[in-house]
Amino acid sequence: MKRISYLFLIISFLSSTLLLAQDKIKVNAQIRPRLQVDNKDFNSNAGANSFTELRTRLGILYSPNENLSAFIQIQDSRLFGMEGSTLTDSKNIDLHQGYFTINNFFKLPLSLKIGRMELLYGSQRLIGPVGWHNVGRSFDGGLLTLNTTPVDIDFIAARTNESGFSGDSLDMFMYSAYGKLKVFEDYKIQPFIIMENEAKVDFGRYTMGFYMADNNSGAGFHHEIDAAYQFGTQNATQDISAFMLTYDLKYTFISKTKPTVSGGFDYLSGDDGKDTDKYKVFNTLYATNHKFYGYMDYFLNIPRHTYNLGLMDIHVKATIVPVKKLKLALAYHLFNANADYTLNNGNTSKSFGSEIDFTAFYGYSDLVKFVGGFSFFSPGDIFKEKKGEDSSTWLYLMAIVNL
C-alpha cells in the first residue's frame, strides 16, 4: 500500500509540474511485453516452457537551466500471472535511474553526474546497460567528465556491492577512466582502464584496453576492434593474467533492400587449471553479452558459463530489408573453448556447440516496434556432457512501445 501511495504522489507531482514548466520537462515511457517459448534444456523429452515478461518504465528529465538537469526513471519488471491471483500485488516498482547532472562544473570544462545511472561504453563488451534484460543494469555512483579539444575522459566511481557488514567487509567498488579521442575524424578510439577491488579481501582486478571502430555509417566496409588485458590479484596465491581480442568486419551493399554481411571472432582467454599460480580466465565484467554470444544466452555470465575454459566465438551474420519497415537478420555462431576440457571418456575437447539466430524487426510506427526471433542450438562435446545431448530451441515475440 505504501508503494502505491508513493507512486500516486510521484504521478501527481509530475502532472502538476508539467503544467507549470512544460518547456523544462521531458517525459518518456516504455512498455515492453515479451512472450518466450523456452525449450533450452537440451532434453527433447521435456516440453517447452512458455511465459511472458513485462517491463514498464516511466522517466522524467527536468532541466531548470542549461547547466543543471535531473533524471528520474521508475520501473516495474514482472511475469504475467506471477501474483497469487488477479487481486494481489507483487510490488515490483523500483528506481532504475535517478541522478542529477551539473555542466560547466565550477566554470571548468567538467560535467558531474551523481546517483543511480546506466553506463554504456564502446561496443558494450565490458560495460553496458543490458537492454534486453527484463530489469537492466544500473550503477550507483558518480561520473566526472573532462571535455577537451583532443579528448573527452569519463572518470567513474561506483559501488557495485554493499554487504551491510561493519567495517565495509566484502564491499565491492569499481573505478574506471574511459577516453574518447577526437583527433581522428574517421575513427572512434576509446582507451580505458577499469579497476575493481573488494574491501578487506585480497582481490584487485585491472582491465586495460581500447575500443576502435570507423565512423562509416553508409555503404561499404565497417570494422571494429575490442582489445583488453586483465591483471591483478585473484586471491593470496593467484595472479591474474587474461585477455580479450575481438574483430568484426561488415560490408553494406548499395541497394534499396540494404543487405549487409559480416563476420568476425571473439577470443576470451581461459584456463585449464594446470598453472595454479596464474588465473588466465578473462571476465567480461559488466557486459551486454546477449548482444554478442548468441541470443539463447548460454554465455551470458562469463566466465561461469564457459566453465573457466574461455571462449572462441566465430560468427557470420547477414541482414536485409525486403520491404519497407521490415528487417530480417540471420546469425551463425561456432562456439569453442580456448582451453582443453577432459571428457568422462578421457578424451579432450574444445567444442561447446553452434547456434543459429533468426530475427525479424517490424517498425509498425514511429512509436511502436515488433521484434520476433527463433534460435536453434546444436551442442558440442562439452555441452553434451554438461547440459544434454539433444538440440535446443527458443522462440520469442516482443513489442516495444516508446512514448
Image (cartoon, rainbow, N blue to C red):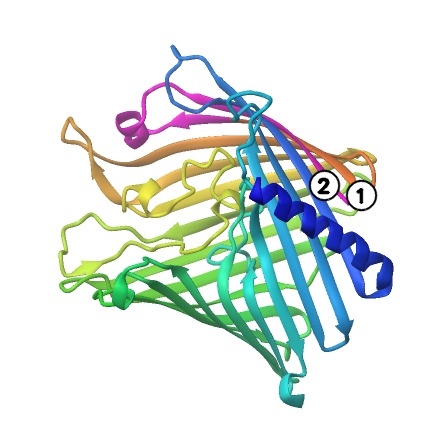
In the rendered structure, are the residues bearing label 2 and label 1 in contact, judged by CB atoms less than 8 Å apart? yes
**Quick check: can you spot residue 58?**
yes
Which is more toward the observer, 89 or 39? 89
Q: Residue at x 70, y 60 (%)?
A: 216
Where residue 82 appears, x then y in whole percent?
A: 52, 26
Q: Which mark is residue 259?
A: 2
Outermost top residue: 45
The secondary structure type at the circle numbered 1 is loop
Going by the numbered disc 1, the residue's amino acid type is Ser
Going by the numbered disc 2, the residue's amino acid type is Pro
Q: Is residue 157 left or right of residue 13?
A: left
Q: Residue at x 55, y 65 (%)?
A: 115
Q: Which mark is residue 255?
A: 1
Query: What's drawn in magenta, residue-wise?
Result: 376-403
Indicate whether residue 377 is drawn in magenta.
yes
Where residue 47 appears, x then y in whole percent?
A: 44, 12
Real-space Cα separation, disc 2 to disc 1, in angstroms: 7 Å
Which is more toward the observer, 150 or 96? 96
Where residue 242 appears, x then y in whole percent?
A: 30, 60
